[in-house]
Image (cartoon, rainbow, N blue to C red):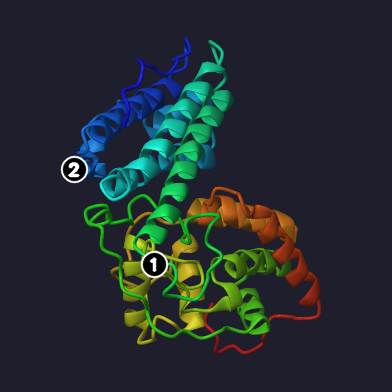
Amino acid sequence: MAPTKEWALHRPDNAPILNPYITYVENVLKALEDGLGDKNAQTLNAGKLVKKAAERPGESALRQQYDLNMEQVDGYQEDWESLDDQIGFIAGFAAEDANTVSREFEDLRDSAVEITAVVPDNPSPARQLDAVNALDNAVGVAYEAILRANAKLVGKSTEVPAQNWSGNGGAAPYVPGLTNTGSAYSGASAQPIGEGVKAKLEDMHKYLLEKGFTPAQAAGILGNLQVEAPGFNTGAYNPGEGAIGLAQWHSGRRANLEAFAASQGKPVTDWKTQIDFMVHEMRGTPGIEGMGGRSESAAYNRLMGAGSATDAAVAFDEHYERSSGEHRGQRVANAESIANSMRNVSASTDSAVPA
């Protein structure tokens, strides 16, 4: 990586929510820049990067001092933690394709400089959170570009049926508390899960209604899954991350899905099991052990507040899949089409189906 001029991120006055995050971003980007420069970026990982973090405001302080709701607090904390995973991946991949990583890193650094430069002094809490989210999204863009380059580099992208995973790396992004960052950057891809089944749209729609979702919410979920796993193939596999299934679970979330399926005595490619696991992530399932970790309750709350297929598709993408948003229009279009085609479908009256 060519030497660069000195740079720093702007820290606005009186921004106690944003400035610790800016310090964190600047520290990890400078560490990554140093690693890329001396070709030792592969030695960095999320565990090392997190030691450079500034102290962030705690949950109670955020809620009490700044009158933030729980969803805003959750989003803020998730932005901090997802940064580790995504930059850690970039660092781990650096040795394999330094040119791509350097180019994307430079774009990311420049984006961070631009995002922070326009934040005024004395910004409102909402403006600070907007900047945090913009910085996290910028990291996500670099992460996805490098992920696609990695798939091409290792030559695995031609070994599996084409998947439409360019929008978010082919997987539901990192979930704090569930992703196993200790092994996420070893350079090895998890094995695919074998041949899946192509779940039927009507069957899944009915099943989601039985789970308590409205027709619009079910359509929003399925519109997303249609992008994640074209043809609703439960064996869909992204070689770049070893992501599997209808929602493209990976790393710790994949391990939890597999443990969940085993606890039910079901194959991991069973479509009902995958939907059950999705629901478990969002609202929990009493009596199931070994599936600990951070829940997706924020995603569930946003989804349950959606009154239309479009709103549900956006909520599921933004808060459960957490993609870059590049293909959100396709997810919405899918959801609206599914909602129209399923208007006459009602929930099953079969009491044997578990809720």
Residue 351: where, in percent of width, then height? 59, 88
Q: Secondary structure at mark 2?
A: helix
On residue 316, which mark appears? none
Q: Which residue is painted at 35% across and 21% down in the image? A: 4
Q: Does the rendering let one see residue 334?
A: yes
Q: Which residue: 45% across, 63% down?
A: 281
Where does the image place residue 171, in percent across and percent down from the top left?
A: 46, 61
Q: In the rendered structure, are the residues bearing label 2 and label 1 in contact, judged by CB atoms less than 8 Å apart?
A: no
**Relative to 155, residue 22 above or below:** above
Instruction: Please name whichever residue, 350 or 108, is drawn nearer the observer in this view of the structure.
Output: 108
Picture coordinates of residue 74, whole percent (x, y) = 46, 42
Tell me if 181 is positioned left or right of 76 in this view: left
Locate residue 50, reporting x and y percent.
26, 36
Q: Identify which amino acid the numbered label 2 is placed on.
A: Thr
Amino acid identity at mark 1: Pro
Is 78 left or right of 180, judged from the image as shown? right
Labelled disc at residue 43: 2
Instruction: Please identify the quarter of the rendering in which residue 105 is found.
Output: top left
Instruction: Check the picture and name the quadrant holding the N terminus.
Output: top left
Identify the residue at image location x=30%, y=65%: 189
What residue does disc 1 label?
239
Name the residue nearer the viewer: 289 or 312. 312
